[in-house]
Amino acid sequence: MSASASSSPKPKYRPETRLVQSGILRSQFGETSEALFLTQGYVYDSSAQAEARFKGEDPGYQYSRFANPTVSMFEQRMAELEGAEAARATATGMAAVTLALMGQVRAGDHVVASSAVFGSCLYVVEDYLPRYGVTSTIVDGFDLDAWRAAMRPNTKTCFLESPTNPTLEVLDIAEIAKIAHAAGATLVVDNVFSTPLWQSPLELGADCVVYSTTKHIDGQGRCLGGVVLGSEKFINDHIHTFIRQTGPSMSPFNAWVMLKGLETLSVRVHAQTDTAAAVAVALAEHPKVTRLIYPGRPDHPQADVVAKQMRGGSTLVAFEVAGGKKGAFAFQDALKIVRISNNLGDAKSLITHPATTTHQRVKPEQRAALGITDGMVRLSCGLEHPDDLIEDLLNALKAV
Ligand SMILES: Cc1ncc(COP(=O)(O)O)c(C=O)c1O
């Protein structure tokens, strides 16, 4: 028996309840809080039990690279939150993305990915997969005809991120899933920017969802982590053995931190989204802000797609400051509360200038095509009082 998450016919509690109650494995001590099973291995009552466990005939744990009770609790909670049959936790978000893609392909296969994905994900698709004989096509993710045209008989999977980093544009997941399926391929969605609360890609037709749990799920800047979610079949066919044999497993300590993060995820994401929406209102008409993108505003470039596939906006706001790079740097350097950092989803508000940090290696013409201008900054709103944050932002704009 796999000790990891699997589907169970439980009542469908609301997300807030699942975030606190799902997946608990209480020990014989009846602890209230999830126990941290900081153990590499497990002992057996007898040689016969060890033999049976290795044969898969005795339920239980063997080794924490395969499964661990604290990690299982995290996987089960994530699966129930996402509405997935199964989940596997990984050491980082990049491990989750790499597993989700590499687990599905063989030499001779083909992958299609949206150009607007996190830089390291693009690296995996464009640089690593071809080393193992897997070709790839990068498309403008907003152009459905480009997805259709990119499909080949050997296309095994499609990959996208929505909302995109850093411009917070939104791709039509349901339509892209239909195109992938019509070609016999699967769709993997990186759902980091929306969090499980605001968007459910599996319900929209995706076959697999991945998260960097480093972001909102930890939410307090402590541990790296990732998770891959899908049907029992998807996880068993593509992920289960790959993770056991190659070893990018999540540490029990990090899983424990993530479990505690999940307990407050809804409270934090609601508050941070409200703050981001208030920031968007305060900055949208500011004379030194030349462009602002926030999912949920009527002027969002894909407002119709946001309305049909998202339940909430975003904890992030992307905006362009007048004066290009010089203006953006002057603005960032004048901030007192918001700190300059490339991370996101944290309790502390963080800002980054993508053109010189996260997207520095992207060619200028490619950056321009993605709308990442020299004046653009990406703000991740934290849990500070929104009025203090807005005051900080408005004061810093005076330096532009
Ligand atoms: C959208 C997205 N996907 C994947 C990752 C990778 O996650 P990690 O840093 O946990 O490996 C990140 C962040 O770095 C991200 O922003």
Image (cartoon, rainbow, N blue to C red):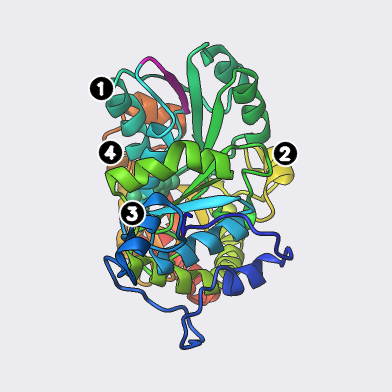
The quarter of the picture where residue 238 lies is top left
* Residue 343 seen in render: no
Q: Secondary structure at mark 3?
A: loop
Q: Residue 249 has which mark?
A: 3
Which badge, 2 or 3, is on the more N-terminal residue? 3
Ligand 1 within 8 Å of disc 1? The answer is no
Q: In the displayed structure, does residue 391 sit left or right of residue 182?
A: left
Q: Secondary structure at mark 2?
A: helix
Other residues around mark 1 within 10 Å, as few (<14) / some (14–19) / many (≥20): few
Q: Which residue is mark 1?
A: 131
Q: What's the residue type where badge 4 is placed?
A: Gln
Between the residue at mark 2 and the residue at mark 4, the CA separation in whole angstroms equals: 31 Å
Ligand 1 within 8 Å of disc 4? The answer is no
Q: Position of residue 207 (x, y in %)?
A: 58, 37
Q: Nearer the viewer, residue 43 or 338?
A: 43
The quarter of the picture where residue 250 lies is bottom left
Q: Nearer the viewer, mark 3 or mark 1?
A: 3
Q: What's the residue type where badge 3 is placed?
A: Ser
Q: Position of residue 162 (x, y in %)?
A: 54, 41
Q: Nearer the viewer, residue 90 or 349?
A: 90
Which badge, 3 or 1, is on the more N-terminal residue? 1
Q: Which residue is mark 2?
A: 304
Ligand 1 within 8 Å of disc 3? The answer is no
Q: Which residue is mark 4?
A: 360
Q: Secondary structure at mark 4?
A: loop
**Residue numbers of the magenta segment:** 108-113
Between the residue at mark 2 and the residue at mark 3, the CA separation in whole angstroms equals: 38 Å
Q: Residue at x 67, y 34 (%)?
A: 174
Q: Nearer the viewer, mark 4 or mark 1?
A: 1
